[in-house]
Image (tube, helix red, strand yellow):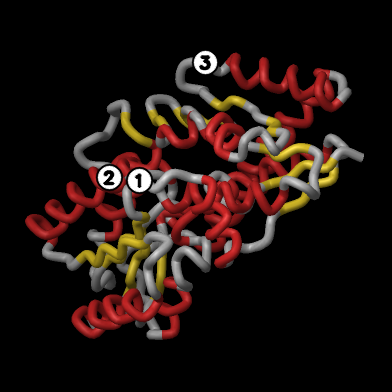
Amino acid sequence: MITIGLPKGLFYFDHHILWEHFFIDLGCSVVTSRDTNRDIMDYGVKFCSNETCLPVKVFHGHVYYLKNIVDYIFIPRYTSVYKNEYTCPKFCGLPDMVIFNLKRQVKVLEIKIHPDKFPSWTFDSLEAVSKLLGIKYTCVLNTFKKAVSEYHRHIWDRFRENSYIINSENSKAVIPVLGHPYMIYDSYLSMNLIDKLEKRNFSVYTPRDICREIKRENAYPFQGKVFWYMGFELLGSAFTFTQDKNVKGLVYLTPFSCGVDAFIVEFMERHLYSRYRIPLLKLMVDEHTGEAGFDTRLEAFLDTVG
């Protein structure tokens, strides 16, 4: 049985359900790397340049952890995910980056995702996967379509259970947490930010709790334009949360040297202050960030808004 490794970073936090279903239904064994820890981060730092953002460094660490225990490591090449919505450049070149930085020590299996301009790339990739794994193309294609359906069903079920309601009668104050999924849902990189807020008796919501259409409608001023996928997610979420009287402030978790965030946070910060007068705490982290300083800033912010 062929073993496929899924690194627990970057795309994993949004799409692991999709890819796990896909490879398991093809008859492969799927192995996920362990949760991020200091060793994984240190390995990533070792293989990446200083200019690389923290999540990409950590992703390399997860790949290094898997390289000797699986046959192939799956790294999709995301360029776009929806019409007029583009990913960060690091997703476009991630398979090449990993192969180069790890000096070809890993066997990478990739599928190209670019529905905005070249949807045919995905089908070409699936044909390459069928040849590599020795599985009929029609089987691979049908399995992929089924996995996509399962993924969308999972997203809808999760949203119905945890959907965010503006101005709800919830007695708790609300602190939304903004940031890329691979930052806010990785407990090591986020330093358990969501748990810390909940222990302070705040209700915590993230962009995942708002439906996609509402986020796009509120992504001022980029509605209907070609823009970053995460830009739509974060701006739309922030300006949706501002409509809620229960929101006391927003926390934005960002990795040092993230080009997308450098633009998004600056725009968001100015707009929130000038129009809504809602405080925004920007927490920037890298591999040198200490939890004590992180907690001190968070506690000071919560004392102010609470």
- Distance Cα–Cα, label 1 vs label 3: 25 Å
Q: Toward which corner of the image does residue 25 lie, by quadrant? A: top right
Q: What residue type is labelled 3?
A: Phe
Dot label at residue 118: 3
The mark that comes first in sequence, 2 or 3, is 3
The mark that comes first in sequence, 1 or 3, is 3
Q: Do the residues labelled 2 and 1 touch (CB within 8 Å)?
A: yes
Q: Is residue 214 visible?
A: no
Circle 2 is placed at which residue position?
Answer: 218
Expressed as whole percent of the image width and height from the top left, the position of residue 179 reads: 38, 55
Residue at position x 52%, y 52% from top?
46
Dot label at residue 292: none
In the picture shown, does residue 61 fall above or below 86? Answer: below
Give the label, 2 or 3, closer to the camera: 3
Expressed as whole percent of the image width and height from the top left, the position of residue 137 reads: 81, 18
Q: In this view, does 57 lie to the left or right of 144?
A: left
Q: Toward which corner of the image does residue 205 lie, by quadrant? A: bottom left
Residue at position x 60%, y 44% from top?
15
